[in-house]
Image: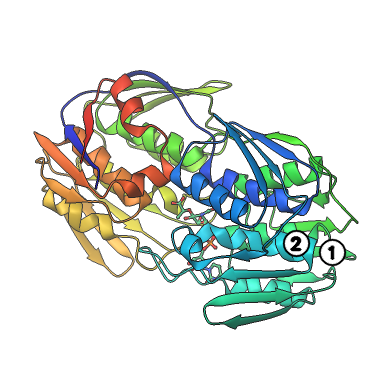
Amino acid sequence: MDKLLIEGGVRLKGEIAISGAKNAALPLLCAALLTAEPVSFTNVPQLNDIRTLLRLLADMGVKVAHEGSTVTLDASALTNPVASYELVKTMRASILVLGPMLARFGEAKVSLPGGCAIGARPVDQHIKGLQAMGAEVSVDHGYVLAKSPRLKGVRLFTDMVTVTGTENLMMAACLADGTTVIENAAREPEVVDLANCLIAMGAQISGAGTDVIRIRGVERLHGTTHRIMPDRIETGTYLCAAAATGGDVRLLDTSSAYLDAVVDKLMDAGCDIVSERNAIHIKGPQRLKAVSLRTSPYPAFPTDMQAQFMAINCVAEGTAIIRETIFENRYMHAVELQRLGADIKIDGNTAFVTGVAKLQGAAVMATDLRASASLVIAGLVAEGETLVDRIYHLDRGYEKLEEKLAVLGARVRRTN
Ligand code: EPZ
């Protein structure tokens, strides 16, 4: 099992390019199921989650051409409308094939995604929405079975803001008979990126990016070429690494446009941040000031940046109060950070982090994607060596992580 060996104490300096967004690419690749024509995507990040989804789509009969960061999908002749447990269990976002498959082929069989380290993560809102659109949906032996000769446009209201729930229902509604209105919709930028691609494919969508999305169903969609938006969470992760090490870093092919809440917090912590048209330049202070936060749906502070901010608060001046309101178990990085000498107290969904002058390098274990990123950030500032185990979690969501860190001067290498 690969590990990451980090020698702490280096101020990160230089510039790196940010990759395409994992959480935009995953629904976008599934959108190709909605048309019989080829769909091409550029700026696709080279990540294990993407490779897993492409394998799943190929298993279903989609023709996949993958050249560097360009992927072309041709779903003209599906042979097997089943998303198997073997693949879905490793990547829960596979549930995103459900809506498009049901809308295009009238049936779908998708393994229920298990929970994952950060929470139960049920998909009841996805199922409730499709049933409201007239689908017959049952759960049998761990699989979601859905059938519908043609979905109907209806008014939908999700019980909570759900990103992939909104994306699944929006894709299903593109080919429904009539107009669908999704209220309480997720406003994440990745939802907007998906809507823009669907519109380019001929879908009639308005309101993406607000909490009310209207989709007027059409007979069919056609092919297009779409560039995946930059990854705002990868961007935020490197901003935190630069902030924590007192570095001077420029991130290219990205923007602060979708990161206001994160940039505000980093400026409160004492960082200098200059937003350019297609880049962000950050300078970290000698020592960060503690910043409290509360995770919430976009445009508020993203839950996917909570672990990284816990790491930077471990060495900041003062005490930070962190409240995780989206997932029920997203503090597993805390015990690992404590092994590095962090002063963290957890009380329910609240974490109290009191900065210490120095963290000590140690062996730690990654438990989920963003938790692993927080351990890497802590290792970059800890004294001595930190060995992060189970970094397959990192490989799911960060392209060429150690190469990019090495370009910024970090002493980091992969071992197994
Ligand atoms: C998406 O997950 C992201 N993944 C997650 O990123 C992100 O943390 C999350 O949104 C919140 O922003 C992708 O986009 C592929 P939700 P998703 O449905 O859609 C509950 C990462 O690190 N819920 O918005 O699965 C759910 O349990 C990953 O890149 C239901 O109860 O999250 C959670 O408490 C981690 N029933 C809350 O809603 C449902 O049917 C928000 O979940 C759906 C969701």
Horizontal and vertical percent for residue 118?
A: 37, 63
Q: Which residue is mark 2?
A: 172
Horizontal and vertical percent for residue 153?
A: 84, 68
Horizontal and vertical percent for residue 6?
A: 18, 34
Q: Vertically, is 37 above or below 326?
A: above
Q: Would residue 234 be seen by someone viewing this image from the given angle?
A: yes
Residue in view at x 36 percent, y 26 percent:
404
- The foreground one among 127 and 36 is 36
- The foreground one among 245 and 84 is 84
Query: Which type of secondary structure does the marked residue at label 1 adopt?
Result: loop
Residue in view at x 25 percent, y 43 percent:
2
Kind of residue at badge 2: Ala
Dot 2 and dot 1 residues touching (CB under 8 Å): yes
Q: Would residue 291 be seen by someone viewing this image from the given angle?
A: no
Q: How many marks?
A: 2
Within 10 Å of disc 2 (Cα), the crowding (few <14, some 14-19, many 20+) is many
Left or right: 52 with respect to 153?
Answer: left
Q: Quadrant of residue 377?
A: top left
Left or right: 340 with respect to 328?
Answer: left
Q: Quadrant of residue 192?
A: top right
Q: Which residue is mark 1?
A: 176
